[in-house]
Every structure is written in structure tokens, then in C-alpha cells.
Image (cartoon, helix red, strand yellow):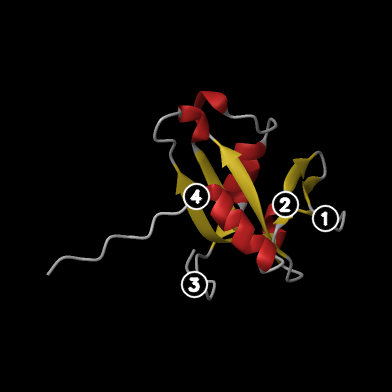
Amino acid sequence: MTSPIPHLTTLSSILEKLRVKRQDNEFRLTDKGFSCCNEKHYQPEDLTIIRTYRFEGQSDPADSAILYLIEANDGLIGYSIDTFGPYSNNPDGYDDFIKQIKVQERETGEEF
């Protein structure tokens, strides 16, 4: 018996589904921690990575990215996108910050 072929998706389709679910809050690294739409700042201990999606550019390495679905301790759910490789444009300290966030992957109620 063969396993089913996994459903492949794109970064833009996941972002659209997050928008529909009102979870399209982007966490951005600032000098005060991750900041989001409500201007609140979060430290790594305030956050949990609940899903991770990795995208590898088939024809262009610049398309390589990881989307982290993140939940804050106040219930806010949002995301952060990490481009990786030589084309990364994240600010200094992003990698260290994201590595400090605990990971507790779980089903989010809908498979993207």
C-alpha cells in the first residue's frame, strides 16, 4: 500500500488562508522583540511556534522560505517569514531570536 501524495501548497495560498481566518498578523523583529499589529512587543518566552511550513524554490533559490505560525501568550496568532540562504533579508538577530521560541507543533484545525 502506498501513502497518499501530500498536498503541495504555496506560501501565498497559506497567507490567504491565514487572512481568511484573521490570523494574518505579521510578527516582525524590532529592537524591543517581535512586534505585531497591536504594537505590543513579545519576547521569545511569550511565544510558541505552533506550525512550520518550509518552501523551497523549484526554479529560483530566492523563493526559499520558512513560515512560522506563532501563538503569543495573550492568544494572538500570527506568522513570521524567514527567507534563508544567501538571499535572506531578515534583520540581524532574527535567527537567534526565532531559535529561542519554544516549538509545540499542533494541528491548527485545518490542513493547509
| Residue under the point 53% across and 76% down | 109
Q: Image point 57% across, 46% down: which residue?
A: 99
Are the two marked residues, 1 and 2, in contact with CB atoms closer than 8 angstroms?
yes
Q: Residues under labels 3 and 1: Cα distance?
A: 24 Å
Q: Out of 53 and 49, give the one closest to the viewer.
A: 53
Q: Disc 2 marks which residue?
A: 26
Residue 112 visible, this angle: yes
Helix or strand or loop: what does disc 3 sit on?
loop
* Residue 107 numbered tag: 3
Q: Identify the residue under disc 4.
A: 10
For residue 21, side relative to residue 74 (left or right): left
Say what secondary structure mark 4 lies in. loop
Report the residue at 43% width, 39% height from top.
56
The disc, 1 or 4, on the residue closer to the chain's N-terminal end is 4
Q: Residues within 10 Å of mark 1 (few under 14, many from 20)?
A: few
Residue bearing the label numbered 1: 37
The residue furthest right is 39
- On the rendered structure, is 40 left or right of 57? right
Residue at horizontal 27 percent and vertical 60 percent from the top: 5
Q: Looking at the picture, how far across and down is residue 21, in whole percent?
A: 67, 69
Residue 71 visible from this viewpoint: no
